[in-house]
Amino acid sequence: MSHGDDEGNERVTEAAAEAERVLRDLEPSVERLLERHLDAARDWFPHQYVPWSAARDFDGPLEGAAWTPEQSALPRAVGDALVVNLLTEDNLPSYHFEIATSLRREGAWGTWVHRWTAEEDRHSAALRAFVHARRVVDPVALERLRMSHVATGWSAHWLSPLHCLAYVTVQELATRQAHRNTGALCGDRVGEALMTRIAADENLHMLFYRGLYHDALRLFPDEAMAALADVLCGFEMPGTAIAGFRARAARIAAAGIFNLDIHHEHVVVPLLRNLGVLTMPGLGPAGQHAQERIGLYAQHLQTQAARARDVYARMNGAATHQ
């Protein structure tokens, strides 16, 4: 074995020991926050949020009516958002694997991961039933997209448990906002109620992870600050690999469902403020560098968001005059 192999194995061993220390030291926080989550969570049932009386049989074995675009009464951007939201939720097996592998499947960690998975699984069940009952999108195209997206899977490539926790903290808040805005703009009473219900789940998930990351910053200030900087500066939602995502995302952004402005104002700024990231004292050189990276990123995102607002305004203006 070469000297380089020895060094590589030593680094892997050190990283594993550090990951174990993080998971061990944070487990009391997981226990406390899990208890809080279970006290706050309320059972709900997907079948109660689906307009079954509005549904009709589709073509195929039941010899119903084939789907056509004019059957959907929802705005196109809302349909795009529902497709992206649904296909993202469909990829839950990949998310469960990545999170359970990065964290643990035993103890309080395992209890949380499995509870989170069970709650998230309701979302895809309810969303699929809703879009079929309301004939929002072509069901054949939707199923083909699902097969392709789930078969491709999703890999996080997180460097550490802290990177995993930083990502899910940001992602849950972004998802909550996207669901809320989808419901608010759908113009459908049942759809709005469903998206509000799903967003409430995502909010509780965000509160769990944000509370956990608050404790991580206290216990591992430099390492947690660095992980948060890495995640924020390279953040992407998990649905970006969906076929046709860019075109759908552009329409979703222009409609004001989720865009850079919303990401800045409703995700990044409140998260940094709540965690006290930019004013956190007592950091070492690595933590200070990460803190500076986050500050510069927030400024850059604000500039990008302002530019994007102009683009969305032009897109909406052009659509109005068509």
Image: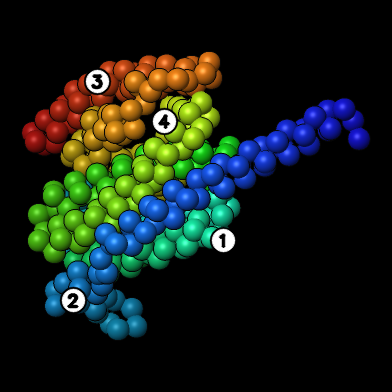
**Three-letter code for the amino acid on which mark 4 is drawn:** Leu
Q: Quadrant of residue 273?
A: top left
Mark 3 to mark 2 CA distance (whole Å): 43 Å
How many C-alpha atoms fall within 10 Å of the one at disc 2: few (<14), some, or many (≥20)? some
How many C-alpha atoms fall within 10 Å of the one at disc 4: few (<14), some, or many (≥20)? some
Q: Which residue is painted at 33% across and 57% down in the image? A: 37
Which of the marked residues, 3 or 4, is nearer the chain's N terminus?
4
Give the labeled residue for mark 1. 106
Which residue of the protein is positioned furthest toward the right in this rendering? 1
Give the labeled residue for mark 4. 232
Q: Which residue is painted at 90% across and 30% down in the image? A: 2
Q: Is residue 231 above or below residue 45?
A: above
Give the labeled residue for mark 2. 52
Contact between labelled residues 2 and 4, with CB atoms less than 8 Å apart: no
Contact between labelled residues 3 and 1, with CB atoms less than 8 Å apart: no
Where in the figure is residue 319, as x and y percent of width and height? 14, 36
Q: Quadrant of residue 5?
A: top right
Which of the marked residues, 4 or 1, is nearer the chain's N terminus?
1
Which residue of the protein is positioned furthest toward the bottom in this rendering? 62
Mark 4 to mark 2 CA distance (whole Å): 41 Å
**Three-letter code for the amino acid on which mark 1 is drawn:** Glu
Residue 302 is left or right of residue 283, and the answer is left
Contact between labelled residues 4 and 3, with CB atoms less than 8 Å apart: no
Where in the figure is residue 275, as x and y percent of width and height? 34, 32
Question: Mark 3: which secondary structure?
Answer: helix
Q: Which residue is painted at 46% across and 38% down in the image? A: 216
Mark 4 to mark 1 CA distance (whole Å): 29 Å
Question: Mark 4: which secondary structure?
Answer: helix
Give the labeled residue for mark 3. 307
**Could you say which is closer to the camera, residue 268 or residue 210?**
210
